Amino acid sequence: MNMNNPFSLAGRQALITGGGTGIGLGIAKALTGAGARTIIAGRREEVLKQAAEEIGGNCHYISYDITDRAGLPALVERIEK
């Protein structure tokens, strides 16, 4: 923990599903602002791209339908790389 900033998320990763709009977008902004490498995921690539550009910094996006449970291990592996 960074004692100078106990709320710092530097060196951490976060995956936010539905991160292109609404509450997910707000969470992505907050986590990225706190220093996390943030990945937003959702089905609408253009919305995700615009959100990632708006957030800036260390926010990235992956177009993915989270209801595809069979593909989740591959998604996690992709994010870890």
Image (spheres, rainbow, N blue to C red):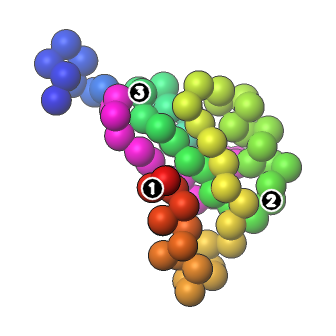
The picture quadrant where one finds residue 74 is bottom right
Residue stretch rendered in magenta on the structure: 9-24
Question: In terms of sequence position, does the residue under pointer 3 or pointer 2 come before the other?
Answer: 3
Number of the front mark, 1 or 3: 1
State which tag comes first along the sequence, 1 or 3.
3
Q: Amino acid at mark 2?
A: Arg
> Vertically, is 63 above or below 37?
below
Residue sitting nearer the eye, 56 or 79: 79
The vertical placement of 77 against 13, above or below, is: below
Residue 13 belongs to the span the image colors magenta: yes
In x, y percent, where is residue 4? 19, 13
First reached walking from the N terminus: tag 2 or tag 1: 2
The answer to whether 11 is drawn above or below residue 79 in the figure is above
Q: Position of residue 43 (x, y in %)?
A: 75, 65
| Residue 33 magenta-highlighted | no
* Residue found at the far top of this picture: 4
Q: Is residue 41 visible?
A: yes
Kindly tell me whether residue 19 is visible in this rendering: no
Work out how far the residue at label 2 is from the one at label 1, CA to CA, in angstroms: 22 Å
Q: Nearer the viewer, residue 15 or 78?
A: 78
Above or below, 4 against 23 in this view is above
In-front residue for pair 41/77: 77
Structural distance between the alpha carbons of marks 1 and 3: 20 Å
Q: Secondary structure at mark 3?
A: loop
The residue at which mark 1 appears reads as 80
Q: Secondary structure at mark 2?
A: loop
Q: Is residue 43 left or right of residue 76?
A: right
Mark 3 neighbour density, 10 Å: few (under 14) some (14–19) many (20 or more): some
* Percent x, y of residue 53: 74, 31
- Residue under numbered circle 3: 34
Q: Is residue 51 left or right of residue 70?
A: right
Q: Which mark is residue 44?
A: 2
